Image (cartoon, helix red, strand yellow):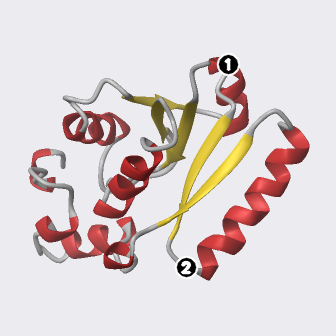
Amino acid sequence: MDRTALFPGSFDPFTLGHQSIVDQGLKIFDRIIVGVGANSEKRGLLSTGNRVRLIRDIYANNSAVEVVAYEGLTGDYCRQREVRFLLRGMRNTVDYEYERGMMLINQKLYPEITTVLLFTPPEYVAISSSMIRELVSFGTDPIELMPKNIDIKNYL
């Protein structure tokens, strides 16, 4: 049986912390779909298309990782794709409380979907997409916070 997980998020942009969750997840799952949430009403640093392109560039040589953009509820997308696992990452207790609430709601609405929470490694706990967006807005290059060989300027 194929064990596929969806790793959903806005990924604006995708960071070393996100990459660490995918890499850990690949030790558990056969395939991971990185689902980039598309919200046309939300203006971020990167367009949805460029977020997808950035993540695809990271995993270009890994057929176990698929990157897609999707709209709507994550549970509905899982049902459409027949995905039974949600992969989520946690950096701290604030993330834990948020993820726990989401898991409880998803259990009610989508009982066939299991949420798997993984901890972000300590060296990446301080890295967040919002921090990278702020650094970029002030003209600072966040290259040390980004996955290897990713230059954020190529996706702006």
Direction from residue 45 to residue 32 in the image, left or right: right
Amino acid type of disc 1?
Gln
Q: Position of residue 74 (x, y in %)?
A: 66, 38
Mark 2 surroundings within 10 Å by alpha-carbon count, few (fewer than 14), some (14 through 19), many (20 or more): few
Residue at coordinates 82% horizontally, 33% vertically from top-left? Answer: 112
Direction from residue 117 to residue 73 in the image, left or right: right
Residue at coordinates 31% horizontally, 59% vertically from top-left? Answer: 15
Mark 1 surroundings within 10 Å by alpha-carbon count, few (fewer than 14), some (14 through 19), many (20 or more): few
Instruction: Give residue 27's quadrant in the image.
Output: top left
- Whether residue 12 is visible here, answered yes or no, is no
Q: CA distance from mark 1 to mark 2?
A: 31 Å
Q: Position of residue 150 (x, y in %)?
A: 13, 51
Relative to 92, does residue 28 appear above or below in the rendering?
above
**Nearer the camera: disc 1 or disc 2:** 2
Instruction: Give residue 16's quadrant in the image.
Output: bottom left
Amino acid type of disc 2?
Asn
Q: Nearer the viewer, residue 81 or 85?
A: 85
- Element type at marker 1? helix
- Element type at marker 2? loop
Residue at coordinates 18% horizontally, 49% vertically from top-left? Answer: 156
Relative to 122, does residue 68 appear above or below in the rendering?
above
Which disc number belongs to residue 92? 2
Direction from residue 8 to residue 69 in the image, left or right: left
Q: Position of residue 2 (x, y in %)?
A: 57, 21
Quick one: label 1 or label 2, which is nearer the N terminus?
1
- Whether residue 18 is visible here, answered yes or no, is yes
Instruction: Give residue 63's quadrant in the image.
Output: top left
Which disc number belongs to residue 80? 1
Residue at coordinates 42% horizontally, 41% vertically from top-left? Answer: 26
